[in-house]
Image: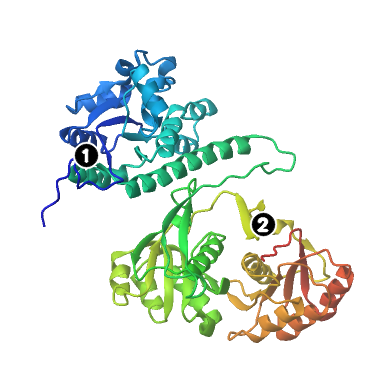
Amino acid sequence: MAEPSVSAGASSSPADLSPVRRALISVHDKEGIAEFAKALAENGVRLVSTGGTAAHLKEAGVPVALVEEITGFPEILGGRVKTLHPRVFGGVLADDSRDDHARDMKQESIEAFDLVVVNLYPFEKTVAAGKARGEVIEMIDVGGPAMIRAAAKNHKRVAVIVDPADYASVLQEVRTSGGTSLATRERLAARAFSRTAAYDAAIAGYFAAAAREPYGFPENLVFAFDRVGALRYGENPHQRAALYAFRSAPPDSLVHFQMLQGKELSFNNLLDLDSAVALARDFEGPAAVIVKHNNPCGVGVGETLSEAFGRAFACDPLAAFGGIIAIRGPVDGAVASLVLQHFVEVVAADEFSEEALAFFAKKPNIRLLRLPVSRHPAPGLDWKRIEGGLLLQDSDSEPDQSASWKLASQRKPTAVERAACELAWRVARRVKSNAIVIANARQTIGIGAGQMSRVDACRLAVTKPVLPIVNCGAASDAFFPFRDGVDILAEAGVTAIVAPGGSIRDQEIVAAADERGLAFLVAPRRHFRH
């Protein structure tokens, strides 16, 4: 089917078509700009540009006029002032339906711009690269956001491009119709305002982080996110859902995972994956974590990943059915063959060997994700939404030092018992409160998660195990309010416990441990996870 050829003034043109006769181009990211500008020029669009961009276009053989030729005023202050002039902004902001605008334009010899192409100084990248404050400040664009906002405001007539990804679609419209449709201009305006909002949010966040607030948190909180894509559905099939990436998230963050195979991820998959990866990162060597419904149901460590996964799965094979798995390290064929003996939804790891990928390809519905599970993220902020607002806190990601634990009981734990308590303690901080975790030195044995009372969490933890409770320690994410929990753990075979202090019955709790012959360690922190 032949493409229609419609001139800007033809009677067959849509009523909302805005001809593109003159374009203003000023970009920091020059990817694809020479090709785009050349194509515009070939379609009769006259180009005006700023210093660096103009030089780039001229080098590519694109005809372009300099901004100073239009304004009669040179760039000054090292390029800080170049577009801030009435002949630039008047050309962008002019409303051709208003007589007073037309009068002013004629009187001041201002010619309209129909297309504005601007992308901004890389402020976010400069901050992420850890550059000095002076260099960061220099990357705060002034004229660019002003031009973008002016063009987006006047989208009734002017199209604005802030992302090279839009070059092709706009060029297609210009080629076929001689201009841009209102729908396109509205879409581009929305993207433009989102870009300047995100840019300002990044700047505000930078200064807020540098300011010394009395409460340790900024007075105003501004976040910027980019939609990664739609999800199949939310927590339930009747709920719509999408994934967004925090604009300043490091490139090795979980949200930037690489999908190697499998159907698209769901809302719940991503929530579980976040929990699984966070826990796997708490370990130093080979480790495997299996999560169901946002709680770990099996955790194992070993000399090899095969050992670690085998131990994680053995903790609770029933709960592990259809689980989300995070593996700390590279998955080889041996690990892949073990995983494929079971039904799993998602496997995330630092890397997959060619042999492992070949094994997994036999079950294409399993989602394989490459992401840096072994990375230790820097402490940051954590937030939870409530109706009409947001709760903000420091993330509970700083590693605990077991050397800070205090012995409260008469009996000291053996080396094996202490190692078991350390593993149980690492897991407990990632389990929904109230949480009780039973483990040996190499794997979890029983997990009691999300119970309304701590004694119920203890009962659940001791009834879940399919492995013997021998040489096992238990960890509680907060203090024991009564001795009944200690009694239940002791009767099941647990011989050492670690828990925070703070109960008015702490002495009674320790006395119960002594009565049962348990070693009881007191940790200085609790780890509620709501």
Q: Position of residue 343 (x, y in %)?
A: 42, 81
The answer to whether residue 179 is above or below residue 352 is above
The foreground one among 129 and 303 is: 129
Q: Position of residue 493 (x, y in %)?
A: 71, 83
The kind of residue tagged 2 is Asp
Q: Which residue is drawn at 21% across and 35% down?
A: 40
Q: Residue at x 74, y 43 (%)?
A: 215
Is the C terminus in the top left, top right, bottom left or bottom right quadrant? bottom right
Q: Earlier in the sequence, mark 1 or mark 2?
A: 1
Q: Is residue 526 left or right of residue 267?
A: right
Is the N terminus in the top left, top right, bottom left or bottom right quadrant? bottom left
Q: Which element carries disc 2, helix, strand or loop?
A: loop
Count of marks placed on residues: 2
Residue 108 seen from this side: no
Q: Is residue 289 left or right of residue 529?
A: left
Q: Which element carries disc 1, helix, strand or loop?
A: loop
Circle 1 residue:
8
Q: Where is residue 337 in the image (x, y as percent from the top left)?
A: 36, 76
Dot 2 crowding, Cα within 10 Å, few <14, some 14–19, many 20+: some
**Residue 109: which numbered mark, if any?**
none
Q: Is residue 86 left or right of residue 181?
A: right
The foreground one among 459 and 14 is: 14
Circle 2 residue:
400
The kind of residue tagged 1 is Ala
Corner quadrant of residue 50: top left
